[in-house]
Structures are given as C-alpha cells and as structure tokens.
Amino acid sequence: MRHVRQAAGALRTLASSYPCVRVTAVRALAAHGGPQGPQGPQAGLVWARHHSDGPSVAGEAGVCHKTDTVVLNPKRSDEMSFPFVWLRDNCQCSECFHQDSQSRTIIMESFNINSKPETLKITQDSLCIYWSDGHVSTYNIEWLQKHAFSTSAQQNWLTNMYRLPRKTWTAKSFSSILSRFKYSDVIKSDAVLYNWLVNLATYGVSIIEDAPAKDTTVRSIAERVAFIRKTHYGEEFSVRAKPGTTNVAYLSANLQLHTDLPYYNYKPGVNLLHCLVQTESDGGANLLTDALAVAEWLKRDCSSSYHALTTTVVDWNDIGQEDGNYFHSIHRAPVICEDRFGVVERINFSQPQRDSHFNVPLEKVKPWYEAMDKFTKGIYSSNFCVSYKMKEGDILTFDNIRLVHGRKKYEDTAKAVRHVIGGYLDWDEIWSRIRVLKNNFRTA
C-alpha cells in the first residue's frame, strides 16, 4: 500500500502542476511487481499522456523504477526506453551542452549517476523531466527517436552516419561497379564530390578522368576533401623508373600485388594515382583485387586458413631513404585485421615489406605459410584480379586498407617515360567530408 500511496501522490502533484498533461492509469503500482502487479517490461510504470487538438508527435511517457528507465510511446512510432543515467547525461540545456561545438559540458567528476526523474511532462513535441537533483531537462521527441536504443535506430545510424556498408566485387563484376567522374565536376560540384566519395567508400575504387597534366593535381583533389596525408615519402610522390632506388615501386619491372605502407600503425586510407604520362609499350597496366572479397571467400571455404591470417601477427618493415630522408618503420599486425565485432577492417599485404623476423611460436610458422599461399593464389586468381591501364589524365583512386594493387612491367622510350604522381588521403577525413556534405544537402 505504501507504493500505491506514493504513486497516487505523484499523480495528484503532476495533474495539479501541469494542466496541459493528463495523468492516466497507473499500470503497476507495485514498484517491484508482485502478485497484484503486471509482469514484464512495463512492471512499475507510472504514465503521463499529452492531449492536444493540434499536430503532435508526443504520446505518453512513463517511469519504470524496476529498470531505471523512462519509457516513451510516441505517436506513429514504436515504444522506446531510455536509462535515467543516459537521459541525465545527455541533457541538451545550455548548462549541460554547448550547442555551437555540439559538445557535452557536464562535469563528469561531480556528475550524479543515480539521479532519478521526479516528474515527467509531455508537450506537443517534447519530453520534460524534473530530476531529483533539482535540474530540469527538455528533450525533443524526434531527437530521442534518432538516439533510441532500439536495434533499428542504432543500425540506421551506424549505416547512414557512421560508415556506409561496403559491397565486394570480383573480376566479373568490376566493370559494372567502376564509376567515373570528371575532374572538373569533382572540383566544382559538391554533389559530384559526394558521389565520388560514396562510390569509393562502397566499392573501394573509382576513376577521376580528364585531370590536368600538372604536378599539383593530386593535391587539388585531396584538398577538395581535406588535406593530403604526408608519409616518409613526402606528400606527393613521383612514380617513375629510377636507377638505384630503394623502393621497388620505382622500378619498371612487374610490381607484385600489395597494400601501401603496411609498416605504418595508422596507414593512409586512400591512394590517389594520377597518370601524367603512360607508357607506349604493352605493359604498365595496374592490377587490382578486392582483398575483402578474397577474405570473405577464404572465411567461407577455408576457415582454418582465415583463422591463421587473422590471428598470426606478422612483422612489416620499411628501411631506406627518400631524397635524403632516412627511415626505419616497423608495424606488427596480421594480414587480415578484424575489429572487435569480427568485421574485416584492414588488409596488410606486401611481399617486399614483410620482415624476416617472424615472432610467432615455431609450430605456427608452416600453417601460416599454407594459409598465406591460399590467400595469395586468391588475390591473383582470374576470378578476383583485374587489369586496368590508366589513360593520361586518369586518377585511379582506391581504398588502401581494402584493395591490393600492383603493376605490369613496362618499357620506357625516348618519347614516353611513364610518370605517375601519387598522394594519400585518410579515411577519417573522408568520412567527415561525407557527413558534412550529407548534412548540407539535408538542410539545403
């Protein structure tokens, strides 16, 4: 009975204080359920409803002390539950949140994680909570819907705002997924820039055509997104045959499939390769394989090899100099790197940059080589690997943490010395640019 009296008192207080709110039935007066109260997720709920003749997205809201949640039932939407502590931490008032920087300003050191709602108020489009610590918070209903803890709401945010879903391709489907964009359009149009970046994020490869024959063209594209990524090879790098080079990419021989800079802990995410001069010989074509597709094939058809390549740590290194800048880079990581959810997030593959130091137990060496052999045969297979010879003015753009790339051997002539200018972008900056453009389109 004590719980009944407390709930009834709360109802009377709420009804007298807020005439715009009609307090309705108490669905479970016993805070801990019990034989006289309903069982299930709504046990312990006290509800308030908003009634209005005008348009409204609000419905009813309740407090469940059993689960320490506020339960919201908006009109034309599914029921949503929000933990007390999350709501208090995400108050949007000027004391708790800085709107210009979109940053929480609550001092965590003095934050009370046990603050509870004392009163709920529902208006046409908002939920107002009066907290036990004396604070008052108002939440827009649509904002709460976007931040709901439901699987559908979270998945919508993860795929539409965090990262776009990737789609794998094979040699058979390559021509159908390869998108082409005019350089001038990418420079001038935000819509074309957005479409290029979305295609790049989705398929890992795209072509920019008709780029001017200037050493600064790659920088212009990079700065359209954010800024060029500097490595120990500089910002832009010039790829042409160089005698006495310490980098096999600067030879005219066959260049094996690889990812760039696997010896970097945070390696550049996207390659930009601008063809200034193409060879007149039959060679010089780029080789490309979607290593994500190969990894999926290996996981499906040879799980033991996939396991070996995702769990065995490999030493990657680069020792040399570029224009007098000496370097010695080392990174240790598997060939196929998964995130904590088991999703492939990075491929490391480079025969020249795989160190002879192999710091694994002796019995794991041979199984790893057997797995590596299967993976290597896969990326070179005609089922996955494609050949694409850039035209002069092409910029080949591709995902360096997903695709492996190489080049067929070629011969320079007095008339044509193959020359490619390269540069890098970071995925963090690309994702940021995609989100900014998407928000701009939405509010235009």
Image (cartoon, grey):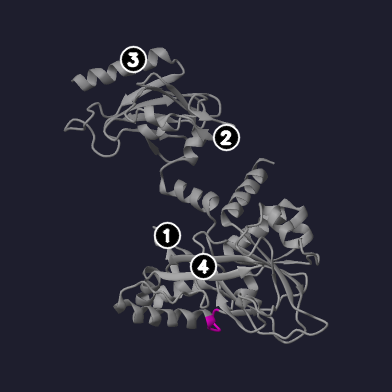
Which residue is the site of mark 3?
Answer: 12
Looking at the rendered structure, the kind of residue marked 2 is Ser
Q: Quote the CA–CA distance across marks 3 and 1.
A: 52 Å
Which residue is the site of mark 1?
Answer: 339
> Horizontal placement of 101 versus 219: left or right?
left
Labels 1 and 4: the sequence-earlier one? 4
Which residue is the site of mark 4?
Answer: 262
| Residue density around tag 2, few if under 14, some if 14–19, many if 20 or more, within 10 Å | few
Q: Quadrant of the N terminus?
A: top left
Labels 2 and 1: the sequence-earlier one? 2
Q: Is residue 335 visible?
A: no
Looking at the rendered structure, the kind of residue marked 4 is Pro
Looking at the rendered structure, the kind of residue marked 3 is Arg
- Count of numbered marks: 4
Residue visible at 28% across and 21% down? 7
Q: Quote the CA–CA distance across marks 2 and 3.
A: 41 Å
Labels 1 and 4 touching (C-beta < 8 A):
no
Looking at the picture, how far across and down is residue 178, in whole percent? 65, 70
Looking at the rendered structure, the kind of residue marked 1 is Asp
Residue 403 against residue 36 in the figure, above or below? below
| Residue density around tag 1, few if under 14, some if 14–19, many if 20 or more, within 10 Å | few
Q: State which region is magenta.
A: 380-384
Q: Nearer the viewer, mark 3 or mark 1?
A: 1
Residue visible at 41% across and 13% down? 17
